[in-house]
Amino acid sequence: MTAKNAFYAQSGGVTAVINASACGVIETARQHPDKIANVYAGRNGIIGALTEDLIDTGAESAEDIAALKHTPSGGFGSCRFKLKSLEENKREYERLIEIFKAHNIGYFFYNGGGDSADTCYKVSQLSEKMGFPVQAIHVPKTVDNDLPITDNCPGFGSVAKYIAVSTLEASYDVRSMAATSTKIFVIEVMGRHAGWIAAAGGLVEDNGIPVVILFPEVEFNQEKFLAQVDAKVKEFGYCSIVVSEGCHWPDGKFLAEQGTRDAFGHAQLGGAAPVVANMIKDALGHKFHWAVADYLQRAARHLASASDVEQAYALGKVAVEKALEGKNSIMPTVVRESSNPYKWSIGEAPLSEVANVEKMMPMEFITDDGFGITAACKEYLYPLIKGEAYPPYTENGMPDYVTMKGVAVPKKLDSFKL
């Protein structure tokens, strides 16, 4: 059988370890030249496929591909571009199949969250109908940790570590100044519908830090919140607050809603921290500082979790291996076998059960008052932030990250308007 080519693309918000998955895909594919001739990457994600802007990863050296494992963000570029349903926009899906046919692509590895799982599933269905079967494997990635079935998602462990450590360090700062200055520190973290990242900030409680967490899963009650903060300040002299960007009022409106929407149609968020901080100032009179972690939390490769890097690479590697076994329309998953000691293995889930399904924080992970995390949540979180996987540093003291050459594959088809 003649070897076919593979297509790899990165989707949605990038992470500190998504390139480790890319490394796993490419290095594993290179070990099977009899079955996978070339790996082409989409420049800026799925847009690269639609516009036939493909990158020849074969032009990258083995050393540079290996360096992806310790380089943050999307080495080949990502995008927020959601393909609509087959009925609404069949031309885009048909265009993908045309590109795959033209470039003899028989394997599709899509590295992303819930929306990309949906796209991957639809491509696997349509390719069969169009007479050009493509093995579509979804490689999980999302800092929100909200994909179903898998125990956790690559990208989350490193964000959790960054938020836990940053909250701890900032809290030590506030504690040292609280007698005469700042008494409140508020950090806003990502998480539109699921409070996994906010939960990670709650780990500082084990270091004696008074912390209040605002989850998307718990409707915001201003009176109860202010009472909780007031009690913490009276007891400890200061308080740290971790607020998820998805924290919302009982009517569903986000505290951070700006009135604009992103490319996926989601409400554009950002600004819950100052809302909460000013609320405390007006009601309780405490001096405050606030921060929005924003891109810092998902780009912080210098503080990545070792287990996160290992899992990100393993899932990329296994995605290729499962494709070579003949698997299609699946997502490799992380299966937790035990938390202490932490043991995990790789499983798989059908994309029909993954696409468009969000995994929220289970209520048994949230304390009864709605402002903290339980022992069960800590048992879940700690293994995911364990271990350090520092990148190499240059003699100038900066991380030694890699930039892909990005050599384009010659085009074969007419241009396509998005």
Image: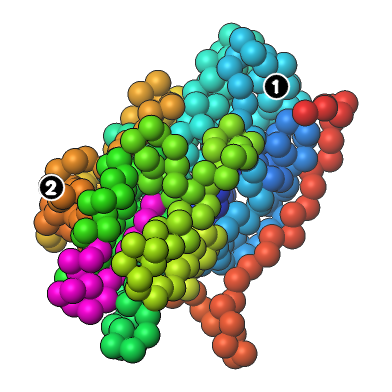
Q: Position of residue 418 (x, y in %)?
A: 77, 28
* Residue in the foreground of this view, choosing between 34 and 174: 174
The structure's colour scheme is rainbow
Q: Is residue 337 left or right of residue 360?
A: left
With respect to residue 184, does 214 lie above or below?
Answer: above
Q: Is residue 86 left or right of residue 139?
A: right
Amino acid bearing label 2: Asp
Q: Position of residue 177 (x, y in %)?
A: 34, 87
With respect to residue 34, does 58 lie above or below?
Answer: below
Q: Position of residue 133 (x, y in %)?
A: 57, 18
Can residue 152 be seen here? The reply is no
Which quarter of the figure has residue 102?
top right
Judged by depth in the image, the label closer to the viewer, 2 or 1, is 2
* Residue in the foreground of this view, choosing between 22 and 363: 363
Labelled disc at residue 368: 2
The residue that disc 1 covers is 92
* Residue in the foreground of this view, choosing between 140 and 378: 378
Asked if the residue at tag 1 contacts the one at tag 2, i.e. Cβ–Cβ closer than 8 Å, the answer is no
User: Is disc 2 surrounded by few (<14), some (14 to 19) or many (20+) residues within 10 Å?
Assistant: few
What's the CA distance linking mark 2 and mark 1?
A: 47 Å
Q: Position of residue 385 (x, y in %)?
A: 30, 64
What's drawn in magenta, residue-wise? 229-244
| Quarter occupied by the N terminus | top right
Residue at figure coordinates x 20%, y 48% from the top left: 370
Residue at figure coordinates x 72%, y 39% from the top left: 48
